[in-house]
């Protein structure tokens, strides 16, 4: 039977092989010529007659005989700055003589143009790319090169509190959609000369800036090379969000668990970089990826490090407990009431039996319907405009709560279980997606085989988790393989003076974080 | 260090094998699945002698009606003699006869719509006649079958088992739960002690020990309402699996003093023209057996601690010598209780204390020759009792508040 399946597999693979993304034949690469008019025609041909592409021709130099042109995209360029630093000095210049031997366009850029960040470019696609990124292009007659002036300014959302990560205590700045702002925010939180920012342009139809950031002396050796290798492998239309990058570089594309983490907060990313990780910024999205990722990171928030250790420890336990509740509650309920009624306390059994008296469905269907209803309501709640939001909350409470029970769709106990599950699943936002799916998986196993089914499912998931690696780092570190010294930041959060070493699997290049013996004490108590 | 690429897609053949194995497990299906609505939860059972089957049993099973459990009044209608289920009753007693207990259980399905579910059974009551005829063959099902729990409480009924299960309790909705709690509450007076299936099994496995099971009685009040109580004749003594005698309240307590089963109890000691009530808080016993001249000598050391909770005299009894006197009186009182019980046990020839087991453990080689003659050896057993009583406090008040 397998042979048949294998044959079909092979056929499918070879037939779909010739279609590659894009599939364009090689055209003759366009090049700049010495004539201004030809160059402008070239650019007009490439960019078309879009009205937001501004081409300004001007005369400058001695007797205003030299011809030049300025190209920029309206809306992406800082027009004021452009006028003042590029046009004005050129127009006011009296010395430049057209045709006079000036070896290099760069000389003009270095001495005449009053802007910093001027680069000489010859490659047409490069120039066009720069222009679409907001730079202004200066073309001068008789030069087959162009000057690209850094001049970006566009409307952007200001730095504000990130929507998905709320903190009670801690900085409230969040990344925005502009990659330069984001790297600047990171540098603000991490003033280290070793912080390296390397840019790549990824995408065929739309070249998106992707930046890899790391701290040179702290990052895991081999990590940055591997990231670069994986990024360079990407050959797609466009990278619209960091999720695209994540999908192309992750270690386990078929797993429901993420092996690449993300964050909207610069202090979070800075903390992770200090542990030996690397960050990937994508232009156009405030979500910055960090690799490698450990399963533990789902339960850790950056606020844990700003609050006191006892409270943070308690919160960590709570989050772990909530995850278990979110995934296992419906399954355990179904398993207990369908297969293991002897485990339920006697008095509770009577109450439960009374509750399901009018319900025509078996427990698993009851649970399935309620989970589905809840997921529908929560998804609708996200998409709704805020004006009708309150109506849906009322409907939701009534529908799920009262009406289901009165109508006989579910027992009151099931409603409580689903309520606990739902609320618990939002305690760990990172795992909400995977827990929604795992919930169904365990529910079905529980319905088929009771507690044994749950145990089996747990075994499957555990084996899968243990086998996962994220950029070479085992996913369940420091639990598997066990690393006792790193356990100080898992379920408990050791005080800052106790965390003297970086995590072993990530920061082994430079293990020592701080001096030991930093525990504070009042002056009288010190020796 | 080169980062590793883990993942399932490296060897597709392994995934397929895993999937095949998983689907085999799915073939197991939903066997053993029972919805909550399909359960007839049994919380109490009664075994009586059956007229139909001389060796069989008349089984009374008390099934819970979950819908009546929440809300509703907890007082049932009194005096409903013919057993018709009233709308406010939270239970239903179903009866069936059979040659064995399992047989009778399955017979019940002729009348109910669900199979009986025994995992939450709290109580097994045996009627006196059935107890006298021997309960061993009936109880095998409760040990062998997977559903009943070994912690089920055992009781003997002064009349028929079904009578106990029929009495609507004052404070509870289910008779079986009320009676189970009643049995366990006796530990406050320690004139009776709850016994469960594990104790039964231990006693039956031993060839010499006799089991004592509490007896519950149904008494009728003035206006005709019935209550279940453990009173008067409270202990049923078994030899093997047959009931051969009864113990009164003080005799049961005497047995418990010696075997260390006292939890809390009250001693009323006559002293200085009144009665002093002593609350025994802690009590324990140490038994040592020895063979002397081919006879068994058992030394029982009882230690107990109490406090004065009720001073019925008009003098303060809080001095050192008062305490010493009271302690001596207490010890004598306890000693006489123990001796009375021992004499009765010896008359009935039932080794309720487990001396036989202790001898067999201490003298294993001699035991071989003794075990068949244990009845006779128990008859000539000598008991030495020493009681050490301690009074710890006289409560919150020293002088009695009296005119």
Image (tube, coloured by chain):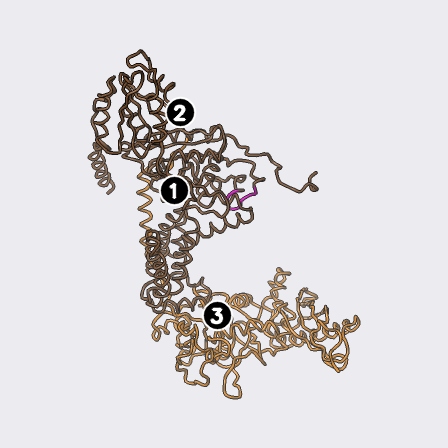
Chain colours: A brown, B orange
* Quarter assignment of residue A140: top left
The x, y position of residue A450, in whole percent, is: 38, 57
Eye-nearest disc, 2 or 1: 2
Packing grade of label 2 (10 A; few <14, some 14-19, many >=20) is: few
Res B285 seen here = yes
For disc 2, the chain is A
The residue range painted magenta reads: A489-495
The x, y position of residue A269, in whole percent, is: 45, 38
Q: Compare residues B75 and A406 and report the one nearer the observer.
A: A406
Judged from this view, the residue extending furthest toward the top is A101
Packing grade of label 3 (10 A; few <14, some 14-19, many >=20) is: many
Which residue is identified by label 3? B122
Say left or right for A460 vs A31: right
Q: CA distance from mark 2 to mark 1?
A: 42 Å
Q: Please tell me whether mark 2 sits on a helix, a strand or a loop.
A: loop
The x, y position of residue A465, in whole percent, is: 41, 43
Q: CA distance from mark 3 to mark 2?
A: 88 Å
């Amino acid at each position: 039977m397998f042979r048949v399946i294998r044959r079909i597999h092979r056929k499918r693979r070879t037939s779909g092989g010739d279609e590659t993304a894009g599939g364009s034949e090689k055209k003759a690469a366009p090049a700049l010529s010495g004539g201004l008019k030809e160059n402008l025609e070239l650019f007009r041909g490439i960019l078309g007659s879009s009205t937001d592409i501004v081409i300004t021709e001007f005369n400058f130099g001695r007797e205003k005989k030299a011809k030049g042109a300025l190209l920029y995209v309206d809306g992406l360029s800082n027009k004021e700055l452009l006028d003042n630093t590029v046009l004005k000095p050129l127009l006011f210049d009296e010395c430049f003589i057209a045709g006079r031997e000036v070896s290099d366009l760069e000389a003009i850029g270095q001495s005449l143009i009053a802007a910093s960040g001027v680069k000489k470019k010859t490659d047409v696609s490069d120039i066009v790319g720069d222009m679409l990124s907001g730079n202004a292009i200066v073309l001068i007659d008789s030069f087959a090169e162009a000057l690209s002036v850094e001049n970006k300014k566009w409307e952007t959302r200001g730095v504000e509190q990130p929507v998905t990560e709320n903190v009670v205590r801690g900085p409230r700045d969040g990344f925005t959609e502009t990659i330069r702002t984001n790297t600047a925010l990171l540098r603000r939180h991490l003033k280290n000369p070793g912080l390296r920012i390397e840019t790549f342009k990824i995408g065929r139809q739309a070249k998106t800036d992707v930046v890899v950031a790391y701290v040179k002396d702290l990052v895991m050796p081999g990590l940055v090379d591997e990231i670069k290798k994986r990024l360079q492998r990407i050959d797609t239309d466009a990278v619209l969000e960091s999720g695209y990058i994540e999908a192309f570089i992750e270690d386990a594309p078929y797993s429901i668990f993420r092996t690449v983490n993300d964050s909207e907060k610069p202090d979070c990313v800075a903390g992770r970089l200090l542990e030996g990780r690397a960050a990937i910024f994508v232009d156009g999205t405030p979500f910055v990826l960090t690799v490698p990722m450990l399963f533990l990171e789902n339960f850790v928030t950056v606020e844990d490090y700003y609050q006191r250790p006892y409270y943070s420890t308690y919160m960590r336990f709570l989050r772990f407990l909530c995850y278990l509740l979110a995934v296992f509650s419906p399954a355990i309920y179904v398993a207990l009431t369908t297969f293991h009624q002897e485990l339920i306390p006697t008095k509770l059994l009577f109450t439960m039996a009374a509750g399901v008296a009018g319900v025509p469905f078996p427990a698993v269907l009851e649970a399935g319907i309620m989970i589905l209803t809840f997921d529908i309501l929560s998804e609708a709640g996200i998409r709704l405009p805020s004006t009708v939001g309150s109506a849906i909350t009322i409907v939701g409470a009534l529908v799920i709560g009262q009406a289901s029970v009165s109508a006989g769709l579910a027992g009151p106990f099931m409603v409580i279980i689903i309520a606990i599950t739902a609320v618990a699943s939002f305690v760990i936002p990172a795992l909400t997606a995977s827990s929604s799916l795992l919930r169904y998986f365990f529910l079905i196993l529980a319905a088929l085989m009771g507690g044994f089914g749950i145990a089996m499912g747990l075994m499957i998931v555990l084996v899968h988790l243990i086998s996962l690696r994220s950029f070479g780092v085992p996913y369940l570190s420091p639990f598997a393989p066990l690393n006792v010294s790193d356990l100080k930041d898992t379920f408990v959060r050791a005080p800052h003076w106790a965390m003297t070493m970086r995590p072993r699997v990530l920061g082994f290049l430079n293990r020592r974080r701080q001096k030991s013996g930093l525990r504070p004490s009042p002056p009288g108590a010190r020796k | 260090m080169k980062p590793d690429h883990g993942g399932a897609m490296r060897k597709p053949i392994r995934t397929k094998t895993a999937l095949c194995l998983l689907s085999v497990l799915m073939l197991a299906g939903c066997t053993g699945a029972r919805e909550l609505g399909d359960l007839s939860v049994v919380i109490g059972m009664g075994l009586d002698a059956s007229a139909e089957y001389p060796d069989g049993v008349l089984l009374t099973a008390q099934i819970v009606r979950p819908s009546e459990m929440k809300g509703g009044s907890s007082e049932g209608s009194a005096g409903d003699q013919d057993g018709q289920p009233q709308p406010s009753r939270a239970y239903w007693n179903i009866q069936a006869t059979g040659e064995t207990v399992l047989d009778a259980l399955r017979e019940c399905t002729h009348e109910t719509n669900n199979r009986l579910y025994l995992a939450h059974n709290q109580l097994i009551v045996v009627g006196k006649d059935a107890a006298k005829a021997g309960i061993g063959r009936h109880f095998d099902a409760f040990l062998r079958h997977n559903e009943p729990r070994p912690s089920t409480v055992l009781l003997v009924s002064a009349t028929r088992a079904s009578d106990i299960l029929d009495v609507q309790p004052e404070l509870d909705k289910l008779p079986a739960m009320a009676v189970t709690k009643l049995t366990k509450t006796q530990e406050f007076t320690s004139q009776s002690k709850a016994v469960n299936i594990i104790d039964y099994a231990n006693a039956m496995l031993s060839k010499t020990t006799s089991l004592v099971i509490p007896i519950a009685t149904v008494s009728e009040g003035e206006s005709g309402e019935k209550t279940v109580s453990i009173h008067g004749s409270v202990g049923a003594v078994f030899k093997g699996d047959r009931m051969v005698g009864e113990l009164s309240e003080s005799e049961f307590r005497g047995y418990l003093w010696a075997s260390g089963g006292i939890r809390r109890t009250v001693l009323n000691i006559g002293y200085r023209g009144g009665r002093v009530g002593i609350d025994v808080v802690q009590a324990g016993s140490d038994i040592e057996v020895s063979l002397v001249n081919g006879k068994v000598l058992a030394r029982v050391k009882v230690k107990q601690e109490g406090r004065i909770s009720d001073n019925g005299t008009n003098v303060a009894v809080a001095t050192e010598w008062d305490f010493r006197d009271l302690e001596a009186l207490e010890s004598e009182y306890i000693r006489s209780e123990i001796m009375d019980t021992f004499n009765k046990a010896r008359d009935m020839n039932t080794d309720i204390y487990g001396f036989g087991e202790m001898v067999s453990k201490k003298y294993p080689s001699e035991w071989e020759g003794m075990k068949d003659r244990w009845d006779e050896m128990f008859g000539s057993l000598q008991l030495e009792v020493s009681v050490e009583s301690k009074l710890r406090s006289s409560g919150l008040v020293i002088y009695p508040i009296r005119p």
